[in-house]
Amino acid sequence: MNTTITRVHARAIWDSRGRPTVEAEVELAGGATGRASAPAGASRGAHEAIDLRDGGEHLAGMGVANAVALARAEIAPRLTGMDAADQAAIDAALCELDGTANKARLGANATVAVSLAVLHAAAAAAGEPTWRWLAQGRAVRLPLPEIQIFGGGAHAGRRTDVQDFMVMCPRAGSIARALEMTADVYRAAGILMDEAGLLAGTADEGGWWPNFNSNEQALVFLTRAIERAGYRGGEDVFISLDIAANELADGDGYFLPLDQRRMTSAEMVDRAAQWARTYPLISIEDPVGQDDMAGMARATALLGDEIQIIGDDFLVTNAARVKQALAGGACNAALIKVNQIGTVSEAAAALNAARDAGWATIVSARSGETEDISIAHLAVGWDAGQIKVGSFARSERMAKWNELLRIEEQLGSAARYAGIDAFPAAVRDRLAR
Ligand SMILES: C=C(OP(=O)(O)O)C(=O)O
Ligand SMILES: [Mg+2]
């Protein structure tokens, strides 16, 4: 089928926080179409690509309107006539047209929507689901999910200092079973919190909005919820944390408002290590801030043989930062968010740099999302091994989980759940023992 781009259209739509974002549609000469929209982070790294966004009281202001206008006026004519099947050329054209180091002129929200829409259109033209088009015949696995049970930090009015309290079910055997187990834990956690008078609704990603009086209390409740749901912590279900420590940075150290503690980088790492010894922890994301290379290296040296140390704000889906971290002995896993860098090809480059380093990779949603299901396809098609989408009970998250169930069904007897193999080698070996 003819994959020449005949039309690129952009519009403003609304995301899961009721904020405007960019949606793009791409049409090809053979009749295939692709559509995608941009997510938006709340805890953003300073080294991320720049979105043209709206803030303040009047949300439907100039930011997204500008991104849409630029997509129509500049991106559309530039990409029209190009081959949608050549993603590298499309993304190179987007970078060149933008002309900045961080998509600040066109807006990463415009480039990411267009880049992903092109990907979906090319897959549609090939008559394939996007995951299969991306895999190009290589073997793929269903990713191991990381699912939020309590939201905190920038996603829940800073009710806890730690941003995400999540669970992982590496021995579930399938996505379908992993979701069932997580649903059990999610419900059990809600019941326990309600009984204790600590439930205050749901946070931005659908995890429970807690009224805990310390970060430690959240860990105690999550461990109890795993047991109450009938699972063994550290066997069937593990805890994963996103500290998002960047949000806690204070001068040359950190300040944790809930725990009312000022901490040095070394103390942050030591406390993470203490939690890892006390609770069934398997993964910690951003235990220190975005530029704290010494802290991240210390966390990796101390804990990297036992648990996954993920860089998110620390790496910002940037292949160059992945290589710097590797050289500095920091991290053993990379979070991959396409909108942190702005195009599919650049995100793939960061993922490949992490994979070449022997790290684990986790394709991730943002705290502001739409019903877009691209990340389910990227996680499978790139064989990332892991995926982080937020929680249950919010449809912008369920759209991704449900798409993974469809992909599991499409794979049929070839479906293979990444499970413990998705972790960095040392962690996998520990679990296999
Ligand atoms: C998904 C996250 O949050 P946000 O999208 O707000 O950066 C995260 O920090 O991993
Ligand atoms: Mg994070």
Image: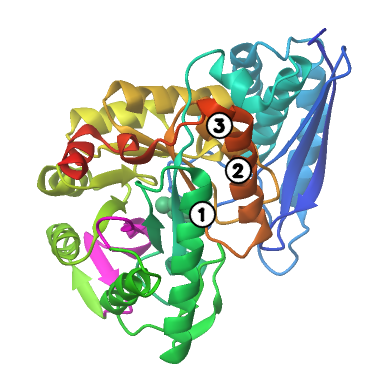
Between 407 and 151, the one nearer to me in the picture? 407
Between 91 and 138, the one nearer to me in the picture? 138
The residue stretch that appears in magenta: 233-259
Q: Which residue lies at the image location 48% right of the left edge and 78% below the top edge?
A: 190
Q: Amino acid at mark 3?
A: Leu
Residue that carries the numbered disc 2 in the rendered image? 405
Cβ atoms at labels 3 and 2 below 8 Å apart: no
Residue that carries the numbered disc 3 in the rendered image? 378
Q: Residues within 10 Å of mark 3 (few under 14, many from 20)?
A: many
Sooner in the amino-acid sequence: mark 1 or mark 2: 1
> Left or right: 194 with respect to 328?
right
Q: Amino acid at mark 2?
A: Leu
Report x, y in % for residue 174: 47, 43
Report x, y in % for residue 267: 14, 63
Q: Which residue lies at the image location 50% right of the left edge and 76% below the top edge?
A: 209
In the rendered image, is residue 152 in sight?
Answer: yes
Between 299 and 107, the one nearer to me in the picture? 299
Mark 1 element type: helix
Quadrant in the picture for the C terminus: top left
Residue that carries the numbered disc 1 in the rendered image? 179
Q: Amino acid at mark 1?
A: Leu
Q: Residues within 10 Å of mark 1 (few under 14, many from 20)?
A: many
